[in-house]
Amino acid sequence: MMKPLMMICGAAAMFVLGAAVAAYAPIGSREPAQQVSSKTVGHAHAEGEKGHDDDGHDGEGKVEMSDAKVAASGIEIRTAQAETLHDSLVLNGILQPNQETLVQVTPRFPGVVREIKTRIGDTVEKGELLAKIESNQSLSVYEMRAPISGTVIDRQISLGEYASEQKPAFTVADVSTVWVDFSVYRRDLPRVRIGDKVLIDVADGGEPIEARLSYISPVGSSDTQSALARAVVSNDGLRLRSGLFVSARLILSAKQVALAIRASAIQSVENRSVVFVRSGDDFEVRDVELGARDAENVEIVSGLQAGERYAAANSFVVKAELGKGSASHEH
């Protein structure tokens, strides 16, 4: 009887001991499980970050873009350097024949046009035959000849018609120079002087033409409240055609700065002025401090070094790529 009782007591003791061990064992056993789980999550996160980098975003502040993609996107790469900033005034103008090198050829006597030797656009030499007219008074035929070398820009007679001595038959102009007439509004007139440099854009894709104002009208227009300013421009290669409109920048003052870049290169990222600096196949986001500016360039006070290459035209394309990278990194 004693032996079964002892066995029962032993079993009960073992049950109590086992329960106690079970109560405390999970606390220690859960710790390694959490550590393994944490490592697994961290590894997965690292893999995810690696995937983002493979998308072309090397991390914060950089955008990967190959030279081929840069060219296809129309991004212009320029070099930061010293520049001259200009305080300027934008003007609109029109090309006109130089009236000082233009001659209207009028018949000496009225009569019938018997022969015409030139057309509008023809280049003639001084003394070259333009037309023959039969005089009504003498019934003899006399010749009209070019008084200067130049281009026939107008003709007001036709074969067989009556030509009057009161009306020019031909206009011959030396088109090696032209006038560019600008309208200057009254508020700007006090700032404009004869001799001021003007950069003329003739909208043909070429470089601006540099000239200087040679004349400012002493009277203005009551209709437009503006006055005429004029520059005489050399017409090399007959690039300038009378009658066409042009735009120009009148240079009022100039300031040399140690470092400047194109204004189109400046982008705003999180309310910061930044420039995208080219480094290998990457564009690095660089915070810059801006100084003076003009219509084309802006001074860089800090954040960029002379000689560094940056995205000038179409830099917004790089900003868009940077935005894609920021969005993909938000978890």
Image: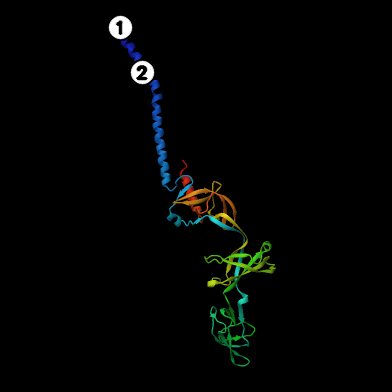
Q: Residue furthest top?
A: 1
Q: Is residue 309 above or below residue 1?
A: below
- State the mark number for residue 2: 1
Q: Characterize the local packing of mark 1: few (<14), some (14-19) or many (20 or more) Cα atoms within 10 angstroms.
A: few
The quadrant where residue 4 appears:
top left
Q: Give the amino acid at mark 1.
A: Met
- State the mark number for residue 18: 2
Q: Secondary structure at mark 2?
A: helix
Separation of disc 2 and disc 1 at Cα?
A: 24 Å
Name the N-terminal-most of marks 2 and 1: 1
Q: Characterize the local packing of mark 2: few (<14), some (14-19) or many (20 or more) Cα atoms within 10 angstroms.
A: few
Q: Is residue 21 left or right of residue 325?
A: left
Q: Is residue 44 left or right of residue 235?
A: left
Tell us which disc is closer to us: 2 or 1: 2
Q: Is residue 211 above or below residue 30?
A: below
The spot of residue 277 in percent (x, y) is 49, 51
The spot of residue 43 in percent (x, y) is 40, 37
Q: Give the amino acid at mark 2.
A: Gly
The spot of residue 7 in percent (x, y) is 31, 11
The spot of residue 290 in percent (x, y) is 58, 51
- State the mark number for residue 81: none
Callout count: 2
